[in-house]
Image (tube, helix red, strand yellow):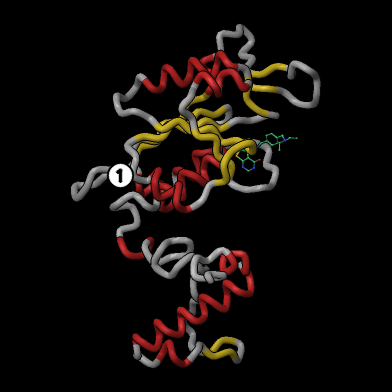
Amino acid sequence: MRIDVLTLFPEMFHGVLGSSTLKRASQGSERRPAPVSYHLTNIRDYTTDKHGKVDDRPFGGGPGMVMQCQPIWDAVMAVERLDQRPAIRILMTPQGCKLGQPLVEELATRPRLLIIAGHYEGVDERVIEKLDPILRLSIGDYVLSGGELPAMVLIDAVVRLIPGVLGHEESCQHESFSPTRGRLLDCPHYTRPRTWQGVDVPPVLLSGDHAAIEAWRSEQAVRLTARFRPDLLRDHPTQGAP
Ligand code: 9D3
């Protein structure tokens, strides 16, 4: 997969894309090609304004600045020409659909994503409309100072699902919000030591009885979900059925 990011702050991405799983995903080896490549583009490089301006005051008044059409349009057109694979265009914006695991799974199957991270109050609506089809995506109902962190969240969620990235192919299958254990939270986890500050690991986990362990984990997943995410139980297809 090729991932293009258009942003005014490419340096914000270097630490995240250059660490841990996202870094390994972009590294090939003699065993396999790199599952993903990242391409950062500074939108400011495409402005035709002689002072490098990329934003202006909102028509109609109001606080903050609005990102102008021209730099974004020219950046998208130039970047799309760099590779023949068609890109899914995505704008990170608080005025969008909320990202969830089903969409993440769908995006992970695509050959190319082009992600625009907005900043300031927003992006001129006309360039968003001209870029149709484009997915407007929010990561949740809280206010951040720009679309850069949301873009990194999206990239992390997608890239770890690309085959060959996690190595351990099963580890991404049976997790919260994926079909295997319903739409429940994951079960609690324990590791050494067996006793810590007087608290023992649940004995069933040391029993070697794999059926008993699986039953216990399922029950614990329901308990944790009821306690911290009761909304997930209420929405469950088996709940409230006649
Ligand atoms: C006062 C109106 N605000 C909209 C809620 C203006 C505004 C706030 C923050 C406009 C842009 C931003 C910057 N945030 C993003 O670009 C953003 C975002 C977010 O703030 N929360 C969750 N997901 C996202 S995706 C992009």
Please give the name of the residue rendered at 60% of the width and 30% of the height, measured from the top-left corner. 118
Comparing 65 with 9, the one in front is: 65
Comparing 228 with 30, the one in front is: 228
Comparing 47 with 238, the one in front is: 238
Question: Could you tell me how many numbered marks the image carries?
Answer: 1
Whole-percent x, y for residue 21 in the image: 40, 52
Does residue 177 sit above or below 84 in this rendering? below
Does residue 109 sit above or below 83 in this rendering? below
Whole-percent x, y for residue 223 in the image: 57, 78
Residue 10 can be seen in this image: no
Whole-percent x, y for residue 191 in the image: 46, 80
At mark 1, the secondary structure is loop
Please give the name of the residue rendered at 41% of the width and 22% of the height, measured from the top-left corner. 79
Q: Quick check: which quadrant has ligand 1?
A: top right
Whole-percent x, y for residue 6 in the image: 50, 28
Please give the name of the residue rendered at 51% of the width and 51% of the height, measured from the top-left corner. 100
| Label 1: how many Cα within 10 Å (few below 14, some 14–19, many 20+) | some
Residue 206 image-quadrant placement: bottom left
Please give the name of the residue rendered at 61% of the width and 67% of the height, measured from the top-left corner. 229
Residue 60 can be seen in this image: yes
Q: Which residue type does callout 1 highlight?
A: Pro
Location of mark 1 (residue)? 35
User: Which residue is situated farthest in the left direction here?
Assistant: 30
- The N terminus lies in quadrant: top left
Mark 1 within 8 Å of ligand 1, using the beta carbon: no
User: Which residue is situated farthest in the front direction here?
Assistant: 242
User: Which residue is situated farthest in the right direction here?
Assistant: 62
